[in-house]
Image (cartoon, grey):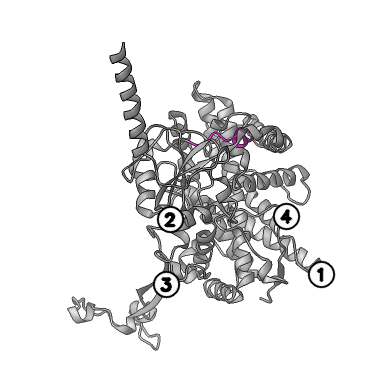
Amino acid sequence: MSALLIIAVLAVAAWLLRRRGAKLPGPTPLPVLGSLHLLGRHESPFQAFTELAKTYGDVFGLQLGGSRCLVVSSLERIREVLNQNGKFFGGRPDFLRFHQLFAGDRNNSLALCDWSNLQLRRRNLARRHCGPKAHTDNFARIGRVAAFEAVELVDALRTRARAAAGALDVKPLLMRAAMNMFAGYMCHARFDPDHDADFVRIVDHFDEIFWEINQGYAVDFLPWLAPFYSKHMAKLSTWASDIRAFILSRIVEQREAELDPDAPERDFLDGLLRVLRDDPTVDRNTIIFMLEDFLGGHSSVGNLVMLALAAVARDPAVGRRVRAEIDAATRGRRPVALADRPALPYTEATILECLRYASSPIVPHVATEDAVVAGLPVEKGTVVFINNYELNTSPAYWSEPDKFDPARFLERTRTRARRNSQCDSGMESDGERAEPRPERRPSRAERRPSAADERETYAVRRNIPHFLPFSIGKRTCIGQTLVTTMSFVMFANVVAEFEVGAEDAASLRQRPACAALPRETFRLHMLPRKR
């Protein structure tokens, strides 16, 4: 018996030694709170993570309340977590707020659910419509819908600018236009923002929820505080229920009543309803929640455009360069279209520069089984924070990272200048038809472009390895094409038609590493341009 006791003691001691040796670097936690107090010293928790990384390295552990956490900051380690070991980190945290937003079960959401076969099916179902490739019919339809709503938005802004004595509350108009973009593209539905009170209320709910998901609360890590958050949780549940009822009654049920099973599939909603009809394993609620999730993506567009307009108001030189680029492309005679994007690199770069400052992973990952990162053990259930803020603001990756400079996303290119069309078509300079010339293979010297044949232009730098605004790996944002295209069209058309300013540019602040603004935020002066 004593021998068994000795063996048991030795086994426990060995286990404790292994645990001690395997301990992640990181600050010593306080009882109950863990290291939550360290996050409260900064405007954004990601600023705190970056500061702590200076002491504990690119990978360190953190105890937040009752949750074991891991913070990963460097590009190499982020790729290790999301790409190389993505199968181990496909979970999401079990925050009470997330359950409230999706009828008591966060797994109803594509963004907040744990990875599963259902999640894979949902992503595959959505990919063709929500992440279309360029040159496809769906991509072209994004451009048409976005351009139409952008023109409607410009008209609404112009009407209000004429009537206003001062700054305008611009954000609600942006959010309603963005929602109509998503509804038009995904559902062939459109709502009147001036006369549809239910639509306006639902857009406001979506905006509140987007702000909510971009925040952190003590109750996320100290769930025993839930009784003190009961009113807050009830408010989240009410917003979500209202949104779901609106989508069901105003979009889904109307489409179901008119759905022609033999007609070609028109949009995302058609695809969802046909899967519901043909696949008995698909639940009706799955379809409703998917549509809600993707329509909610409009909040990203509206908030991003608001941030971009604030950037133009803070730095008028940026606005002047954007307008000059747009005027050269459109000659001031037509709205900006998605097809203009290659000719407007600085305009697109302005949006990317806003993303650089604002983007951060909205929802942390969770280890679904024991794993290893940078040679350090990570236990199942560990909450993993991907610190994009470090990638987006470090001098190791960016020159003068504190400066707002869209040009950092541009690269010089050289293109062949177009030759005189008359000469190319066999016409002499006086307009007379020339005799056909015998074909001759040009010499090597003739084939080499001369300085006169080339001109220097700019293009957007793509595939910057350390710029990951939509994450990487199997949980990459599937709606990023919708966000980038629609925000470009909306922003470009507004800046083309208005001088954007503010009474106090210094007041146009946003929280670092936060892509959301409060529903009630700063106002902007919108002065219609003389075209």
Q: Tell me if residue 126 comes above or below residue 455 in the rendering.
A: above
Question: Does dot 2 land on a helix, a strand or a loop?
Answer: helix
For residue 436, what is the image quadrant? bottom left
Mark 4 to mark 1 CA distance (whole Å): 19 Å
From this view, report whether residue 360 is shown above or below residue 258.
below
- Between the residue at mark 2 and the residue at mark 4, the CA separation in whole angstroms equals 38 Å
Q: Are marks 1 and 3 in contact (CB under 8 Å)?
A: no
Q: Can you say whether 216 is above or below 246 in the image?
A: below
412 with respect to 243 (left or right)? left
Please state the extent of the stretch shown in magenta in the rendering.
Answer: 92-101
Q: Main secondary structure of the magenta part?
A: helix
N-terminal label among 1 and 3: 1
- The residue shown at (63%, 71%) is 314
Extreme residue toward the front, this view: 2
Label 3 crowd bin: few (<14), some (14–19), many (20+), radius 10 Å? some
Q: Which residue is mark 3?
A: 458
Q: Closer to the N terminus: mark 2 or mark 4?
A: 2
What amino acid does circle 1 point to?
Answer: Ala
- The residue pinned by badge 2 equals 55
Describe the element under mark 1 as helix, strand or loop: loop
Can you tell which quarter of the image residue 307 is in?
bottom right
Q: Earlier in the sequence, mark 4 or mark 1?
A: 1
Numbered disc in front, either 4 or 1: 4
* Residue 233: image location, x then y, percent: 69, 35
Q: Which mark is residue 520?
A: 4
Q: Are marks 2 and 3 in contact (CB under 8 Å)?
A: no
Q: Amino acid at mark 2?
A: Thr
Cα distance between the residues tagged 2 and 1: 52 Å
Membership of 98 in magenta stretch = yes
Q: Can residue 359 be seen in this snapshot?
A: no
Report which quarter residue 468 is drawn in.
Answer: bottom left
Q: Which residue is mark 1?
A: 165
